[in-house]
Image: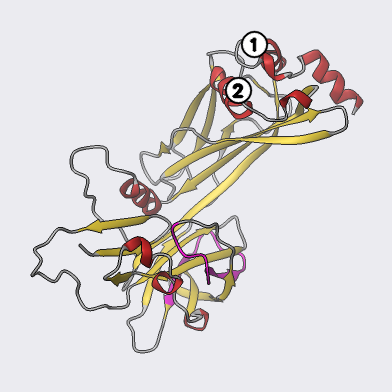
């Protein structure tokens, strides 16, 4: 039994059964693996470039050696990204290597690196990257960008307070961006933990929402998500359960600017990759591979993020945290106590 491993952000292990007199391994060849997600909202951009590998040993043993999955050579001199608009090349970006610490695990941690470039991106342009190593076919791909979209709710007005206090849902609503296919939401919840000696700002990240898919890639498709208030209470309870310092906490105070809503969008290629990369749940486990890399494998796609920050929870929601059925034991202040704290601090 031999294993062919293609290492990306996720790893697919292909196991093949064979007769003992049949040689499954082909001659080794260089297969470049590239992953990059451009974001018009950012000015620093990364490519992860590594290699597929073939070997006789256990896949788990081979993965412990960095030279199995990473090129030992600095490839930055061969990498470039071009900005194209209206049929004309406008700009060229060049990359440098950046070494990163990697958490210990199944895969090698030594020599872990990515390639980085900086500069503003034009949302109306197309971006093409190239890896031109001597005596090898050029590895390349291209992507258009997705960019800003309209968020209808939550409102930007400070007058709106977010109601997460009952089974009645709070509706989050936005319009799709041109080229945007897949959307996710993340909400940050900010509060203070007060002890006899200190006050600590805490943030809980709520991100287990369902993915929303736009029915088309045209701009302005109305999209929404309903969030039940009880799900917020349940989330807070689950995050603060079994806190080893609970006995030391005298009171929790919700911050006045208590909620940040973060919206993340991805293009059609990213959506397709996400769909194919999900675990199979049916009888047929094998899935087709997806790549949009020429002379290599991987993904080069576009994403975008934007936020509505500093939203305030409603008085009834504050009271639900304090005295409701989900979190009364967590020492959240009532709405009256919370508003008094805001006015005096």
- Identify which residue is drawn at 36% across, 80% down: 138
Q: Nearer the viewer, residue 192 or 314?
A: 192
Residue at point 39% right, 55% down?
10
Q: Nearer the viewer, residue 88 or 154?
A: 154
Residue indicated by mark 2:
237
Image position, residue 172 (x, y; %) = 54, 29
Residue nearest the viewer, comparing 268 with 208? 208
Q: Is residue 262 above or below residue 46?
A: above
Q: Residues within 10 Å of mark 1 (few under 14, many from 20)?
A: some
**Local secondary structure at mark 1:** loop
Can you see residue 241? yes
Residue lying at 78% horizontally and 25% vertically, measured from the top left: 249
Residue 101: x and y in percent read 59, 63
Which residue is under mark 1?
A: 324
- Would residue 326 appear left or right of 195 to someone viewing this image? left
Q: Earlier in the sequence, mark 2 or mark 1?
A: 2
Which class describes the residues within 10 Å of circle 2: few (<14), some (14-19), or many (20+)?
some
Secondary structure beneath label 2: helix
- Residue found farthest to the right: 344
Q: Which residues are magenta?
A: 106-130
Quadrant in which the C terminus is drawn: top right
Quadrant showing the N terminus: bottom left
Q: Nearer the viewer, mark 2 or mark 1?
A: 2
Tell how many labels: 2
């Amino acid at each position: 039994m031999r294993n062919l491993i293609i290492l990306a952000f996720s790893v697919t292990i292909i196991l093949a059964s064979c007769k003992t007199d049949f040689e499954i391994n082909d001659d080794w060849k260089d297969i470049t693996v590239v992953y990059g997600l451009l974001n018009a909202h950012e000015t620093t951009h990364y490519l992860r470039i590594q290699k597929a590998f073939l070997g006789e040993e256990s896949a788990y043993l081979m993965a412990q050696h960095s030279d199995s999955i990473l090129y030992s050579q600095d490839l930055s001199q061969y990498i470039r990204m071009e900005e194209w608009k209206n049929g004309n090349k406008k700009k060229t970006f060049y990359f440098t290597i950046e070494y990163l610490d990697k958490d210990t695990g199944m895969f090698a941690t030594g020599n872990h690196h990515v390639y980085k470039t900086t500069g503003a991106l034009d949302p109306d342009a197309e971006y093409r990257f190239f890896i031109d190593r001597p005596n090898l076919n050029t590895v390349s791909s291209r992507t258009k960008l997705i960019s800003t979209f309209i968020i209808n709710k939550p409102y930007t007005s400070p007058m709106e307070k977010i109601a997460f206090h009952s089974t009645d849902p709070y509706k989050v609503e936005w319009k799709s961006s041109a080229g945007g296919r897949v959307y996710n939401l993340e909400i940050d919840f900010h509060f203070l933990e007060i002890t006899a000696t200190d006050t600590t700002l805490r943030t809980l990240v709520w991100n287990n929402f369902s993915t929303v898919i736009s029915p088309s890639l045209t701009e302005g498709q109305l999209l929404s998500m309903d969030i039940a208030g009880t799900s917020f209470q349940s989330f807070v309870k689950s995050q603060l359960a079994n806190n080893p310092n609970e006995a030391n906490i005298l009171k929790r105070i919700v911050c006045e600017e208590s909620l940040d809503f973060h919206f993340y969008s991805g293009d059609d290629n990213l959506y397709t990759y996400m769909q194919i990369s999900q675990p199979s749940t049916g009888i047929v486990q094998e899935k087709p591979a997806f790549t949009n890399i020429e002379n290599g494998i991987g993904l080069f796609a576009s994403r975008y993020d934007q936020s509505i920050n500093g939203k305030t929870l409603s008085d009834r929601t504050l009271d639900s945290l304090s005295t409701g059925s989900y979190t009364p034991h967590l020492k959240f202040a009532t709405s009256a106590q919370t508003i008094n704290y805001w006015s005096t601090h």
